[in-house]
Amino acid sequence: MNQRLLFEGRALWIHDFEIQQMGYNERFTIRHFSFTPPLAKHEGHIILTDADIILDGSEYKRIPLSNIEELYYGFDEHYTPASVKNFGAFWKPIRIRYGYAGILYLIINYRYFYTANEHFLSLLKNLLVPEQ
């Protein structure tokens, strides 16, 4: 079956359990220095098709859209505003809950004060919520 390519870009990502394993300095303090990347453990290429999200970089992950249980745009108890520069004034992470207890935070096409998170989230929501 051919899949339609809907989005391609760069991504930073981290799993909830990886955040929980971080120390205070790694999670909060160093994030406020210039040119320090956002809270993430992995980086690479992201592809969105009409069937999957594919992350390929420091780790490979394929998330079938049918396995996505929840999308959330914003901060929560794990990925907090205090863990990013400017306390989240310019962008927020995308949280995806999928499969059995999988939680992933994404930052798409990060450029210091800009991300493509809202655009990516809009594409993803259009795929997951059928038009009426």
Image (tube, helix red, strand yellow):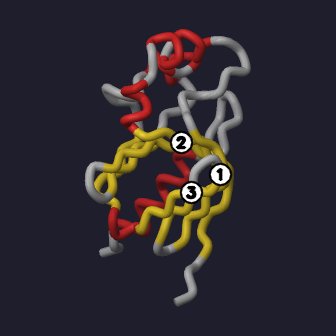
Residue ID at (37%, 66%): 128
Provide residue 64's location: percent of width, then percent of height: 42, 68
**Between 16 and 93, the one nearer to me in the picture:** 16
Mark in front: 2 vs 1: 1
Is 89 located above or below residue 129 in the figure? above
Label 2 secondary element: strand
Label 1 Cα crowd, 10 Å radius (few <14 / some 14-19 / many 20+): some
Instruction: Please tell me which residue lies in front, 23 or 127.
Output: 23
Residue at point 49%, 39% (across, down) = 14
Q: Residue at x 71, y 15 (%)?
A: 34
Quarter that holds the C terminus: bottom left
Figure quadrant of residue 99: bottom left
Q: Amino acid at mark 2?
A: Trp
Report whether 18 appears left or right of 68.
right
Using the numbered discs, state the Cα–Cα distance from disc 2 to disc 1 in whole angstroms: 10 Å
Distance, label 2 to label 3, CA atoms, is: 11 Å
Q: Position of residue 114 (x, y in %)?
A: 65, 35
**Amino acid type of the residue that numbered disc 1 sits on in the rendered structure:** Gly
Callouts 3 and 1 close, C-beta under 8 Å: yes
The secondary element bearing badge 1 is classed as strand
* Disc assigned to residue 13: 2
Q: Position of residue 117 (x, y in %)?
A: 54, 45
Q: Which residue is mark 1?
A: 57
Q: Position of residue 103 (x, y in %)?
A: 36, 45
In the figure, 25 relative to 69: above or below? above
| Residues at circles 2 and 1 in contact by the CB criterion of under 8 Å | no
Q: What element does badge 3 sit on? A: strand
Q: Amino acid at mark 3?
A: Tyr
Tag 2–tag 3 contact (CB < 8 Å):
no
- Residue on which disc 3 sits: 60
Q: Is residue 132 above or below residue 79?
A: below
* Among numbered discs 2 and 3, the one appearing first in the sequence: 2
